[in-house]
Image (cartoon, coloured by chain):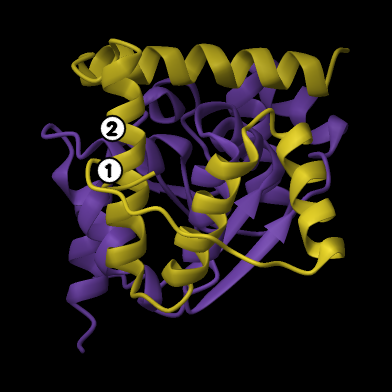
Amino acid sequence: MISIRGETVALDTNVFIFALRKEPDYPACETLLFDKLPALQVYMPLQIFLELQRNLTASEMRRVVHALTMAQAVTWDYAPARIDLIQQWEQRGAKKGDAAITAHMEGAAIRYLVSENRDFLKELPALPFTVLSSEEAVRLLGESGS
Amino acid sequence: MSSISQTVQVTLRLPKDIYERITQAALIEQQQVEDLLRTLITEGLEAHTTVRELLEHVSEDYRARLAREGKLHQSSDDVLQELRDLREQIARDLYPR
């Protein structure tokens, strides 16, 4: 059984949005962000940061950023993803946006993306990272103790 | 901001340079100075809360805003589709080639 405790994970925009909306279809998003954040090591790539910024007001964004500073660790990656990697993933069938996320993840050697977006799995059979639902991420955090 | 149904009026004395920074920030964020002061005080208080308390307040404000915009009861599938579209739009802007 894998554990994501001690692993750096990226949280997709939909995890933040569903958590803040308190979306009943995805209750584990709220559990993961509101209750498990101090146990997580979070990687925040530019693409996801910009998507959040477009969805939230300046005040909401500042407070989400502040919350992220309470994670076990947070890595802010403000650099654009590598163009050669984006093109490579587009050629393999990914849409440009998903290719950008994949390039960020590959470039930073991040092994887990928590997302409710199943497009990654449909588009790309050989991803360099594992896509977990928020429910799976909560379970994998809980299974490793404390 | 959260819980503004009951309010009290407060008179505040600030150093002039702080006040000028606030008016400048209000201009940039296109807010009234009074609204920004309320935001800054709330955020200052939230600096001492737990993650859940902090995010509960953000969620409350976010959901109230979505309700005003008529978007609170969007289906999760519609939200996901909007996020996919936004992802493509941002990626096209960032990486035009």
Which residue is pictured at 57% across the width and 43% down the height?
B34
Disc 2 element: helix
Q: Nearer the viewer, residue A66 or A83?
A: A66
Which residue is pictured at 84% across the width and 52% down the height?
B20
Q: Are marks 2 and 1 in contact (CB under 8 Å)?
A: yes
The type of residue carrying mark 2 is Arg
Tags 2 and 1 on a common chain:
yes
Q: Nearer the viewer, residue A137 or B24?
A: B24
Shown in yellow, the chain is: B
The type of residue carrying mark 1 is Glu
Q: Nearer the viewer, residue B77 or B13?
A: B13
The answer, for residue A8, to whether it is visible in the render is: no
Vertical arrangement, residue A74 with respect to residue B23, above or below? below
Which residue is pictured at 59% across the width and 59% down the height?
A43
Name the spot of residue A61 as percent of width and height, x first.
55, 45
Q: Which residue lies most toward the left here? A: A24
Subunit ID for the residue under disc 2: B
Disc 1 element: helix
Q: Is residue B3 rendered to the left or right of residue A119?
A: left
Q: Is residue B10 rendered to the left or right of residue B15?
A: left
Name the spot of residue B22 as percent of width and height, x first.
74, 51
Label 2 – label 1 distance at C-alpha: 5 Å
Vertical arrangement, residue B46 with respect to residue B39, above or below? below
Q: Quarter holding the C terminus of chain A? A: bottom left
Subunit ID for the residue under disc 1: B
Name the spot of residue B44 as percent of width and height, x first.
52, 68
Shown in purple, the chain is: A
Residue corresponding to mark 1: B60
Residue corresponding to mark 2: B63
